[in-house]
Amino acid sequence: GAVVSQHPSRVICKSGTSVKIECRSLDFQATTMFWYRQFPKQSLMLMATSNEGSKATYEQGVEKDKFLINHASLTLSTLTVTSAHPEDSSFYICSASWVQETQYFGPGTRLLVL
Amino acid sequence: GQQLNQSPQSMFIQEGEDVSMNCTSSSIFNTWLWYKQDPGEGPVLLIALYKAGELTSNGRLTAQFGITRKDSFLNISASIPSDVGIYFCAGQREGSGTYKYIFGTGTRLKVLA
């Protein structure tokens, strides 16, 4: 149990385009989903917390207009990187939780912006 | 963002040896989680701890929730090559009022066959 999927697993896009990443909880209903960004050889940095049906809460320094998060259902959250630039290239990972105790992570999405 | 102090940062060990790593904070935590991350993949939950003093095992892995609630330890016994990876602790701070977890800086483990 507690399986979280992410799609796509990797994406290459041109600078200026937008990219959508999906995060799904496959066998449980996630009341809360989190989006993280991870640079090579570094820890996970929380970008935002999203609760189903409400606006996401962004961490300090994360541009909400740049990283649009939608949590339309208890099993799906999406992160859209708008007008992507090379500095947005990174490994993006989501996690899902149905109680506040435990988070289960997706496999991650590697984004490369050319 | 805030991160937990995790040590050691990296370690090379011989196959068969036991491994210990820990996570410390100046704040009190309600929950501690330990994850392992392989290259290019998402972290996988190893052990979850919910009470001070709790000692929980998962195969060759054992983790403890420190009595002071400001630290946690992970031990791996009789290490094998597939234990290679990055281990992260994550804690949920008491009184944070959120479901957020703070992550440790990671311990990079390399096992020499």
Image (cartoon, rainbow, N blue to C red):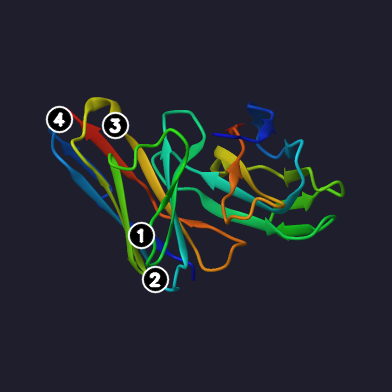
Q: Are marks 4 and 3 on the same chain?
A: yes
Earlier sequence position, callout 2 versus callout 4: 4
Please give left or right for residue B5 compared with residue A85 in the image. right
Q: Give yes or no for contact between labels 2 and 4 (Cβ–Cβ under 8 Å).
A: no
Of residue A103 and residue B55, the one placed in the foreground of this image is A103
Q: Are marks 3 and 2 on the same chain?
A: yes
Residue at left 13%, top 33%?
Answer: A16
Q: CA distance from mark 1 to mark 3?
A: 21 Å
Q: Amino acid at mark 4?
A: Ser
Earlier sequence position, callout 3 versus callout 2: 2
Q: CA distance from mark 4 to mark 3?
A: 10 Å
Q: Position of residue B93 (x, y in %)?
A: 68, 48
Of residue B76 and residue A60, the one placed in the foreground of this image is A60
From this view, report whether residue B60 is shown above or below residue B82.
below
- Give the residue number, with chain letter if any, for mark 4: A15
Residue at left 25%, top 44%?
Answer: A10
- Give the residue number, with chain letter if any, for mark 1: A5
Element class at badge 2: loop
Earlier sequence position, callout 4 versus callout 3: 4
- Give the residue number, with chain letter if any, for mark 2: A74
